[in-house]
Amino acid sequence: MDWLNALLQGVLLGGLYALFAAGLSLIFGVMRLVNIAHGDLIVAAAYLALVVVEATGLHPLASAVIVVPVMALIGYGMQRLLLNPTLGKDLLSPLLVTFGISVILQNGLLVSFTADSHRLAAGSIETASIEIVPGLAIGILPLMMFSASVLIIWGLELVFYRTSLGRAFRATSDDAEMAQLMMLDRRHIFGMAMALSAAVVAVAGIFLAIRTNFDPASGPARLIFGFEAVIIGGLGNLWGTLAGGIVLGVAQAIGAQISPGWQILAGHLVFFLVLAVKPRGLFPRMD
Amino acid sequence: MAEPLLSVRGLKAGYGDFQALFGLDFDLGEGEVMALIGANGAGKSTLLRSLTGLVRCGRDMVRFQGEPIGGARPDRIARLGIGMVPEGRRLFRSLTVEENLIIGGERATGGAWTLERIYGLFPILREKRKNPGTALSGGQQQMVAIGRTLMSNPKLILFDEMSLGLAPVVIKDIYAALPAIIGTGVAAILVEQDVTRALSVAQRFVCMQEGKVSLAGRPAEHSRAAITAAYFGVAH
């Protein structure tokens, strides 16, 4: 039963990792950009949620009504002002800019909020659980995270495959030059992609803040988990990213079951195993 | 005389340190069809890329409907009414045939060309509309590429190597559709390897050699020998 429990918790944890990863996957898919600052944006969103909760007294989950649109705006602005001017020349310059954003965010948060760790108190849902069978319970919060993750990925797929904006994303990803000849202003398209990514980041940040302690240096680990989930799932496939998150979550939960020290390492080992056996990930959709 | 639709003056352009165009001049009127001929490396593709904004050039070197557009962003130039059917078709491979057509038109202001009318011109595309664009034969892909550009209802279409890599019978089909396209009053610049075919549908031609205009005029005004000489750069 312990192992079954570990497996179940791992799957649910995978939902959170998929949330970390979805925005990363989206940005890479549309503009071939690896956003090194992704993890730090998640942590920045967590701090934003903290500020909103302290200022308004809203429930952490309800703070999403403010955090999500604000993060989307920040994402759009960041893309238009900082990243667009560097895109297209080579792959290195935008990568370095995101690295710079990462460093600035971490230090900016350190100055504003000190190195103390914080957590968002979400009340009773933190510990509430449903017992499926005796001895096997599902936490409400992990279940919410997982459901949110599935809903968000489903929503992103709808945007990608059923809307005009999604068509523009895919066309730009296929052939950026031809997309411009189709009257697509790629500065705006890229801005919208980053806004969407940042909106997902906002949700991930809120869940992160409720689930664990976070401090200004928490970002890079989130980037690594997200990155691993994207690679395991296969580039350009959002459902694959969810699968990648689940694989990573299960690996960590089973590792933790073996010994607490094995939790993170087990995840990395599975990541390396997938890279070695299927370098393009389990469900690649992109060349 | 009325203002020409497109006016190119002293056009110089290139890639980095490499200059491909050395001062081109020509005009194109509303609804006119111009054949752009010349050997490989003469600068035909660079010229088309300059007209669409994919290669930078000076602002006043290209005027469209009297407005200087040289060096403007490609999406802005497309909005003004210059469309291109690119060499090698370049369909969006993650889009279906129908999505390829829709994306061509959905940001345009509208006009005579609609999805229905494209399907009327190329009925096979209606059958294949749910297929990925790249799952089609070369000729069908070319039809999608033409349809995609038509959907934006441009005032000027640039056809780059429309028949390259296609079977002769397919080329005949594609050219059979040309009168229906040009008949709507759209102007066209036709870059074509097959000089005879290009000259037969064009009212005017520009022959390029080493980034300059080597001969221009109406096909009937010049002997075949003069055009050949301008094409290959041999003295006559």
Image (spheres, helix red, strand yellow):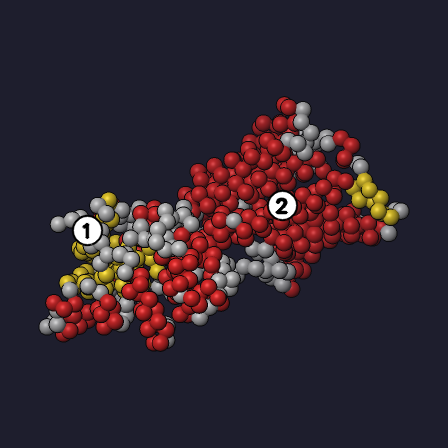
Most foreground residue, A216 or B182 = B182
User: Residue visible at 42% across and 58% down?
Assistant: B116
Above or below for A60 versus B147: above
Residue at 40 percent of width and 52 percent of height: B105
Check disc 1 and report the residue beneath it: B4
In-image side of B182 versus B136 (left or right): left
Packing grade of label 2 (10 A; few <14, some 14-19, many >=20) is: some
Q: Is residue A256 above or below residue A51?
A: below
Q: Residue at x 63, y 63 (%)?
A: A278
Three-letter amino acid code at the position of disc 2: Ile
Q: Check disc 2 and report the residue beneath it.
A: A152
Q: Say if A79 sits above or below A236 in the image.
A: above
Residue A243: x, y in percent?
Answer: 67, 54
Q: Nearer the viewer, residue B168 or A141?
A: B168
Left-right relation of A140 to A235: right
Crowding at mark 1 (Cα within 10 Å: few <14, some 14-19, many 20+): some
